Amino acid sequence: MADYIDALVDAAADGDGVSLDGLHVARTGDGYRLETPSAERDGLSESALSDALSDFDEYATNWFFWSRVVGESSPQRRAFLRWVEGADAEDQSVPARYDALRDGIEREWGQLHVTVTLDDDGQRHYELRHVNEADREHDDLDTYHEPLAARQLATYDEKGRYRPLKSGNNLAGGWVFPDLDGRDLVETVETFYPASVPNWYREREGTLDVEHWVDTIGRQTGMYSVVKTWNRGDGHEHVDWVAESCCDDSQCVKRREWQYDDETDLDVDGGDGAFPCREPCSLVIAASRKWTRLEGENTQTYEFELTPSEKEQLEAIVDAVADDRTDDIREADVYEGANRYRARFLRAKLFDDDGNLCGVPTEDES
Amino acid sequence: MQALVIVAHGSHLNPDSSTPTYDHADTIREVGAFDEVRTGFWKEEPSIREVLRTVESDEVYVVPLFISEGYFTEQVIPRELRLDGWDVADWDSDGLSATHVTLPAGDVPEKTVHYCGPVGTHEAMTDVIVRRAESVTEDPDVGDGFGLAVVGHGTERNENSAKAIEYHAQRVRDMDRFDEVQALYMDEDPEVDDVTDYFDADDIVVVPLFVADGFHTQEDIPEDMGLTDDYRTGYDVPTEVDGHRIWYAGAVGTEGLMADVVLERAADAGADIGDALEVVRERTRKTPMAGD
Ligand code: SF4
């Protein structure tokens, strides 16, 4: 008799018996009672129960996996692994889920793509790769097995630049973790996106401690305490701009849940990320310190003479930088305003020797 | 279960800032002294704010990978960890003597958090400075004929920073191993710029008491000492300056033996680490002992 059936029979003999995903086994006055959504058996002896369970092998291995392999020691790990295979979907029986698992059930988590499959013993196997490479052959990708290998993979973007924000929407690809167990899957996911699983879990449990802009900057001290002075009056337009700059789905895969304060939502959408962002991150705080200083300046009226195309070119350059497209503009593509030669021409024509646009000094010299 | 959490500064700009933190965490993970080893950062992720929720264990030892007591260890880290009832007076420290406090943390009320003093002020740090000198000279017996300079910020930003430098310099001096030992500073006298003025010995090992390599240790100090005009072109170890050979060691925090100090801090706070200290001391040695 398979080990998992022995373990299940032992567990059924204890206290309230066993109850998971539609399988119920318990000791009653006259022997064991076994129930699944499609069958009920009563009055079973211990050996009859073992035999009967063999007819419901998928329920038995499913129970063993969740009770003995995954267990309850980390509720957040368990919840995440159950989410990966949709185990909490009420309308799906274990046999239907097993059918899906044999083909592979896929999930996305930020820029990660997880596929869970099943072996003959009901053990789950998890494969993890970049979401843009879901269809790539294994042979085209570098293979990793250690969760901590993700640390290096998460450090640099596709162009080799340092990624200061782990949840930045610029995770590089080229790698695959072909066969992780549940524990290592969560470790790996947590290395790519630290604290994403605990925060997602708290959100599901209704206990996520969202800390809004006003509270988060309110607790800053030292060099960051200045950000508090950026809030003046009732407006929160400045924080809308921060969120639009940094937290947009195009920039960060977390779903921004923090708002201006308890009562005031930002006007910008928080995005569709799988896991939440509970407070302005250190990058946003550091950038906001700079913006606090810059936004303390008063506007001035400058007079520049530009051709319509020059005005549009300046706009195109800002767009290209903001969308990180400058490297994609081909050297000879002079139809793009942010093309290097076009920008050099503009500088040669319009800047004076001190770098002033149209020779207009930044500070009024009169 | 017991967990070790190493908290450090990290950087938005410099990927090397967190490298020593990760390296020491890996070393300690490998000896298996803790059920879990986690890292948390002020500028990277998980943030110090969220690191405790990544931990499963009920006993958590938090060790700051910082050089001195001050703003970060006294204000920022306790606040971000949400240590309930934290009062810096509980450390009862003279600026060097903080060991640990045991407190609950609002973020994970079911856990016990042992918040330790920074690595930089632990007495075991002196051994790391010496080990760093061994590593950079590739001589396990370095000392005879050598001067040793311990370098830090001055008092400008934090008076405890200079205390830690002076403390370790004195302890190395007391070992009677190097011909001369001198504490030097970046922004006050005795200044690291004038390093050769402070030594008679031909050979001087210079060890900056910094957690990670970065702007100060890779750019400022080498240029200030005259090892190079432009840090980007690099420098030799040793480099000849004013008739002395300067063996510049880079940040002491990158030395593998730092893992030992992290362990010591946790053990002082009550962590059960078995023989991990001995194992780490041996495993992190790069220069073979005589007879090996
Ligand atoms: S504050 Fe914005 S940019 Fe930072 S992690 Fe949250 S959503 Fe992302």
Image: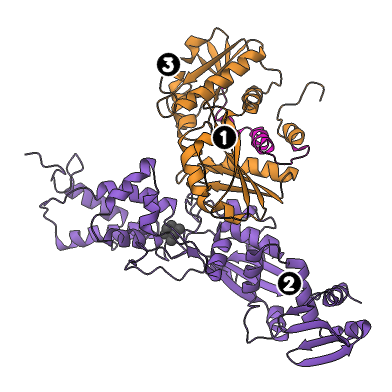
Chain colours: A purple, B orange
For the residue marked with disc 3, what is the amino acid?
Asp
Residue B11, labelled with which disc?
none
Q: Is residue A330 magenta?
A: no
Q: Secondary structure at mark 1?
A: loop
Q: Is mark 2 within 8 Å of ligand 1?
A: no
Callout 1 amino acid: Pro
Mark 2: few/some/many CA within 10 Å (<14, 14-19, 20+)? some
Report if residue B267 lies within the magenta region.
yes
Residue A295 picture location, percent across and down: 24, 51
Please indicate, yes or no, whether residue B247 appears anywhere in the rendered image. no
Q: Which mark is residue B189?
A: 3
Residue under label 2, please give it: A66
Kindly identify the residue that appears in the image at 83 percent across and 87 percent down.
Answer: A33
| Badge 2 and badge 3 both on one subunit | no
Q: CA distance from mark 2 to mark 3?
A: 64 Å
Q: Are marks 3 and 1 on the same chain?
A: yes
Q: Magenta stretch?
A: B247-276
Q: Is residue A264 above or below residue B52?
A: below
Image region (quadrant) for ligand 1: bottom left
Residue A121 in which image quadrant: bottom right
